[in-house]
């Protein structure tokens, strides 16, 4: 018998070098079959844009006769080209462009603010004529610069912006520009700063603290000449407060009590009261217990001679009453001082204040909240209305007083009648005291 064949036939061994050779042949075959197109070079486009950016470093005041109108127009065209490129870019900007762009923005925006022409107030509420609005002559260039910054924020990643000088120093300098008198610039800043707050989640705490410092400086420095920007910053804060989670964090409550509420104190309240009131109401809606703080502090900051401010605060208290649902137990102990203040406003010599204090009694929610303490507050209210009917100079105030009197008499007939009797008794007692006083003076005159 011949020898048996093995079960497995031996194959020639394949080395690692053979595998590399086969892989190289395969790659060469693919490249030879289909040649992929090379991406177009971006260097010429980038170089051209860098040249345009370098031409925009020169600043124009638009007030110097030596400045060339042709140069101003050329810079405006160059800025428009930069804006068009950034706005139309569908991908992230090249890294070599970011640093020059942000440097260009900083150079043009972060300039010293001019001396304010309208100090302390945007206008005097008692004057009919409003002051002339102060506008920046360089706005044709600044507007495009702000649009470039807005597009840059929208089309660039956070990491890329942080690597290229868009840091805390940039944010602080941007916040200082809110003191500009030009409302167009403040409107652009409001939009951009809110965009940065939305995008820079890691810097939100820093941005809130920076805004808080602006508010505190405005409240605590009575000689501060720049009220500008407070209303715009409060608008930004309004949307921020709207996003706060419930229950509120302690730091947010501290901001409410120590920063937001004291903004009722400055005499320039009329410039930003609408935005401040919105922020306050957003807090109260999230936590009703804060209504007690609002009532206490607003009454503490109540003005003595500022009639326009009184009208605003009465309106804010009425709005506060509207959001108190259900009625908090804390309100009852504050209802008496609140209604006492409203009653004092009823007899104000200023017809606007008197009418605003009377109209609050037409609010069903206010009537409901005061029903538990009506016995304590109605005598003072009745005394004020009777004084208006007999002594107030304004016929309009007298007419509104008559309407409110009729309403309260219908709601509390017995109590109202009792208040009238007490008022008449007090008048008789006062007359007796006056008679005694005159008699004593007469006796003294005769004795001398």
Image (cartoon, rainbow, N blue to C red):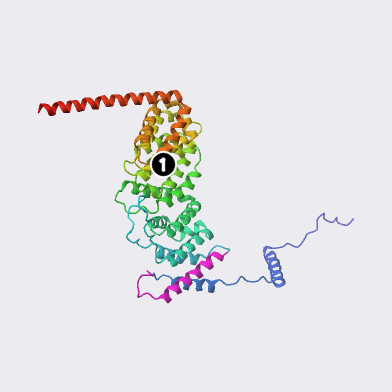
The answer to which of 315 and 379 lies nearer the viewer is 379
Dominant secondary structure of the magenta stretch?
helix
Secondary structure of the residue carrying tag 1 is helix
Q: Residue 165's image quarter?
A: bottom left
Write the residue at 48% across / 59% down: 161
Q: Quadrant of the C terminus?
A: top left
State yes or no: residue 410 in magenta. Answer: no
Q: Mark 1 sits on what residue?
A: 396
Q: Quadrant of the N terminus?
A: bottom right
Please name the residue shown 37% across and 60% down the image: 132
Residue that appears at 40% across and 23% down: 418
- Say whether residue 133 is left or right of residue 91: left
Residue 76 is one of the magenta-drawn residues: yes
Q: Position of residue 87 (x, y in %)?
A: 54, 64
Region of the chain picked out in magenta, as a range: 60-89
Position of 15 with respect to 143 (left or right) is right
């Amino acid at each position: 018998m011949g020898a048996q064949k093995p079960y497995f036939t031996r194959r020639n061994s394949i080395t690692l070098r053979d595998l590399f050779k086969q892989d190289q042949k395969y790659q060469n075959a693919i490249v030879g079959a289909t040649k992929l197109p090379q991406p177009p070079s971006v260097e010429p486009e980038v170089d051209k844009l860098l040249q345009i950016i370098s031409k925009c470093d020169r600043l124009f005041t638009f007030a110097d006769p030596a400045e060339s109108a042709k140069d101003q127009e050329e810079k405006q065209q160059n800025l428009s080209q930069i804006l068009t490129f950034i706005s139309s870019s569908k991908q992230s900007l090249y890294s070599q462009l970011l640093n020059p762009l942000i440097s260009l923005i900083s150079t043009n925006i972060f300039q010293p603010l001019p001396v304010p022409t309208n100090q302390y107030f945007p206008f005097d509420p008692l004057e009919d004529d409003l002051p002339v609005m102060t506008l920046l002559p360089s706005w044709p260039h600044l507007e495009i610069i702000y649009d470039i910054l807005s597009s840059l924020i929208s089309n660039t990643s956070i990491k890329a912006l942080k690597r290229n000088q868009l840091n805390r120093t940039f944010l602080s300098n941007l916040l200082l520009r809110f003191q500009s008198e030009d409302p167009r610039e403040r409107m652009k800043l409001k939009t951009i700063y809110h965009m940065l707050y939305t995008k820079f989640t890691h810097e939100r705490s820093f941005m809130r603290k920076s805004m808080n410092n602006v508010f505190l400086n405005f409240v605590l420095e009575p000689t501060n000449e720049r009220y500008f920007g407070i209303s715009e910053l409060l608008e930004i804060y309004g949307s921020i407060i709207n996003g706060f989670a419930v229950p509120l964090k302690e730091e947010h409550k501290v901001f409410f009590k120590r920063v937001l509420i004291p903004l009722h104190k400055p005499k320039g309240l009329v410039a930003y009261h609408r935005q401040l009131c919105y922020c306050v109401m957003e807090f109260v809606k999230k936590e009703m217990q804060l209504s007690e703080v609002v009532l206490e502090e607003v009454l503490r900051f109540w003005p003595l001679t500022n009639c326009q401010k009184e009208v605003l605060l009465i309106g804010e208290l009425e709005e506060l009453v509207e959001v108190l649902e259900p009625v908090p137990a804390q309100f009852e102990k504050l209802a008496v001082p609140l209604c006492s203040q409203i009653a004092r406003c009823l007899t104000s010599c200023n017809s606007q204040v008197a009418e605003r204090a009377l109209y609050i009694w037409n609010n069903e929610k206010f009537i409901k909240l005061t029903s538990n303490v009506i016995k304590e507050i109605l005598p003072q209210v009745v005394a004020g209305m009777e004084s208006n009917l007999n002594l107030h100079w304004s016929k309009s105030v007298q007419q509104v007083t008559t309407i409110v009197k009729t309403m309260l008499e219908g709601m509390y007939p017995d109590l109202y009648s009792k208040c009238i009797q007490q008022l008449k008794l007090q008048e008789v007692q006062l007359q007796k005291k006056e008679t005694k006083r005159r008699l004593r003076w007469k006796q003294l005159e005769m004795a001398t």
